[in-house]
Image: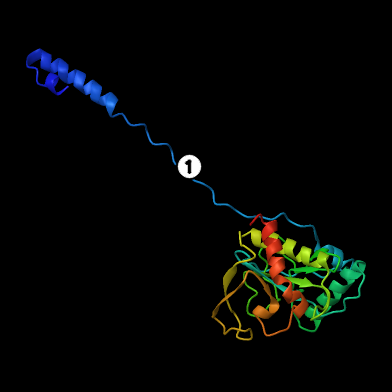
């Protein structure tokens, strides 16, 4: 091709055309493939069956207070209610009404503090008003009610007390679903800012806590009891599996 490019006159012009055509075919590059943006993997757990507030409220339904919301829920705190364990599951609505009466009457709260309650048969109840799928601010863990949800196990689970399997499964299910709405791994730790010096941390302090934590991680208490606290690692693992994590 170099020799043809040196031919004088018309021959040279023809040679240049031939060279140009040949070059075009020899260096042609395929157009780049379009970059397809991959959506991040979102780990969601199925929404468990949750008995609505109206069921435990009954005919004398307490008025629904005006709820307050955060932007999302990034952690859940597990509690026990420090109440008798020998109850019939059919009595759970009545028991929850008694919690409501105590918290709104004696403590003067505007509503029950827990977002969810779980009985020993594994039934999950809606607690605080405002919508189960919304980030309702509760009154369950002093200093750490923002961006969290409270799940209360109905009963007392101190050292040596058996914790029903149905109860731990239900706690894992509601925690997995609630944290999954913000794609939070239940086995992870999250940063939460204390809003009250009455907690384990001074107000304004950023604390690194489990995304699925016991009440005693944020407040000086034995809640949720030694027996239930000992099961939290396995509950975290179960919740993670429900979100499709490995």
Q: Residue at x 68, y 58 (%)?
A: 241
The image shows residue 103, relative to residue 179, as above or below, that is below
Relative depth, front residue between 3 and 226: 3
Relative depth, front residue between 194 and 13: 13
Name the spot of residue 63 as percent of width and height, x first. Answer: 80, 69
Disc 1 crowd, CA 10 A, few/some/many (<14, 14-19, 20+)? few
Q: With 182 as the anchor, is 47 left or right in this view?
A: right
Q: With 86 as the anchor, is 218 left or right in this view?
A: left
Name the spot of residue 119 as percent of width and height, x first. Answer: 84, 68
The structure's colour scheme is: rainbow
Name the spot of residue 175 as percent of width and height, x first. Answer: 70, 64
Residue 16 picture quarter: top left
Name the spot of residue 205 as percent of width and height, x first. Answer: 54, 80
Task: Answer yes or no: is residue 113 visible.
Answer: no
Relative depth, front residue between 188 and 2: 2
- Residue hosting label 1: 36
Residue 231 picture quarter: bottom right
Relative depth, front residue between 133 and 90: 90
Q: With 173 as the anchor, is 14 left or right in this view?
A: left
The image shows residue 38, relative to residue 51, as above or below, that is above
Quadrant into which the N terminus falls: top left
Quadrant into which the C terminus falls: bottom right
Numbered disc 1: secondary structure: loop
Q: Residue at x 26, y 25 (%)?
A: 24
User: Residue farthest to the top?
Assistant: 10
Residue 100 picture quarter: bottom right
Q: Residue at x 67, y 73 (%)?
A: 213
Q: Residue at x 77, y 72 (%)?
A: 152
């Amino acid at each position: 091709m170099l020799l043809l490019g040196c031919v004088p006159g018309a021959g040279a012009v023809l040679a240049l055309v031939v060279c140009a055509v040949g070059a075009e075919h020899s260096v042609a590059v395929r157009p780049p493939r379009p970059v397809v943006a991959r959506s991040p993997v979102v780990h969601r757990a199925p929404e468990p069956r949750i008995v609505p507030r109206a069921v435990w409220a009954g005919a004398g339904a307490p008025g629904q207070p005006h709820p307050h919301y955060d932007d999302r829920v990034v952690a859940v705190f597990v509690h026990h209610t420090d109440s008798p364990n020998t109850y019939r599951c059919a009595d759970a609505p009545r028991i929850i009404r008694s919690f409501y009466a105590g918290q709104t009457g004696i403590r003067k709260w505007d509503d029950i503090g827990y977002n969810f309650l779980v009985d020993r048969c594994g039934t999950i109840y809606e607690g605080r008003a405002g919508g189960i799928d919304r980030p309702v601010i509760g009154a369950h863990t002093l200093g750490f009610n923002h961006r969290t949800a409270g799940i209360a196990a109905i009963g007392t689970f101190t050292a040596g007390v058996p914790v029903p399997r149905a109860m731990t499964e239900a706690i894992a299910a509601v925690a997995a679903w609630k944290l999954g709405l913000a794609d939070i791994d239940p086995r992870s730790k999250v940063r939460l800012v204390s809003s009250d010096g009455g907690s384990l941390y001074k107000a304004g302090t950023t604390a690194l806590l489990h995304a699925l934590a016991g009440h005693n991680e944020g407040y000086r208490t034995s809640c949720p009891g030694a027996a239930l606290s000992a099961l939290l690692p396995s509950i975290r693992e179960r919740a993670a599996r429900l979100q499709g994590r490995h």
